Amino acid sequence: MPIRFHSPCVFVRDMELARIFYEATLGQTPTLALDGYVVYPGFALWRADTAGQHVFGDASALPPGRLGRDNFELYFETEDVEAAFEAVSARAEALCPLAAQPWGQRCFRVRDPEGHIVEVAEPMELVVRRLAASGMDVAAVCAATLMPEAFVRAALGS
C-alpha cells in the first residue's frame, strides 16, 4: 500500500484575512473553496474550528491566539524576487529582508496573518543561470550553489 504525500494543511482562525493574503498578496488561485477550507495548488487552508472538529473532534480544541508557532514554513518561488519583496513586504509582517542565502539564492520571509512563516525565493535554476551569466564556469557554480553538476548542467541546458 503506497502512501503518497499530497499537501500541507495550514490552520487559520480568520479565513477571509488568510485568503486575502494568499490570493491578493501572493497571487495564489484556489482550486476548491468550501465552508471551512480552501485548497490551492500545493497546500490548503483549514479554518481553525473546522480543523479542530475534524482532527480532535472538538471545534474549540486548538490553542487560543495566532496559530503560527515558528515551526513550519510555506515556500514559494518567483522569477522576480525583487518585485515580490516590494509587494509582499508592504502587506505582511517581515521576518527578514530580501537577502542572498549562503548558496546564492535570494529570498525573504514574512508572516501570514496567522503568524505562519512564508518564504518567497527565486528558483535555484535562476540562481544557476545568473551565476553562469556572471562568468562562473560549471564547477564554480556548483561550488557556489551547493548544487550537483547534473542540476547545474540541466539548469543551463547543457
Image (spheres, rainbow, N blue to C red):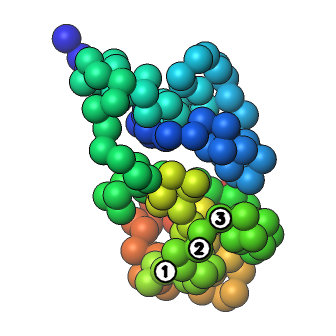
Front-most of residues 100 and 74: 74
Label annotation for residue 94: 2
Question: Residue at image x 45%, y 39%?
Answer: 10
Position of residue 136 measured from the top left corner of the image (x, y, whole percent): 60, 86
Disc 3 target residue: 92
Marks 1/3: CA–CA distance? 21 Å
In this view of the protein, can residue 102 be seen by the observer?
A: yes
Looking at the image, residue 13 sits to the left or right of residue 106; the answer is: left
Q: What residue type is labelled 1?
A: Gln
Q: Quadrant of the N terminus?
A: top left
| Sequence-wise first label, 1 or 2 | 2
Above or below: residue 82 compared with residue 11? below
Question: Residue at image x 33%, y 18%?
Answer: 54
Number of other residues with Cα within 10 Å of mark 2, as a class: few under 14, some 14 to 19, many 20 or more: some
Looking at the image, residue 132 sits to the left or right of residue 63; the answer is: right
Q: Which amino acid does label 2 sit on?
A: Ala
Above or below: residue 50 compared with residue 151? above
Position of residue 134 measured from the top left corner of the image (x, y, whole percent): 69, 87
Above or below: residue 4 compared with residue 11? above
Marks 1/2 in contact by CB < 8 Å: the verdict is: no
Question: Residue at image x 44%, y 38%?
Answer: 11
Disc 1 target residue: 101
Q: What residue type is labelled 3?
A: Ala
Q: Quadrant of the C terminus?
A: bottom right
Mark 1 or mark 3, which is nearer to you?
Answer: 3
Front-most of residues 12 and 80: 12
Marks 1/2: CA–CA distance? 17 Å
Label annotation for residue 13: none
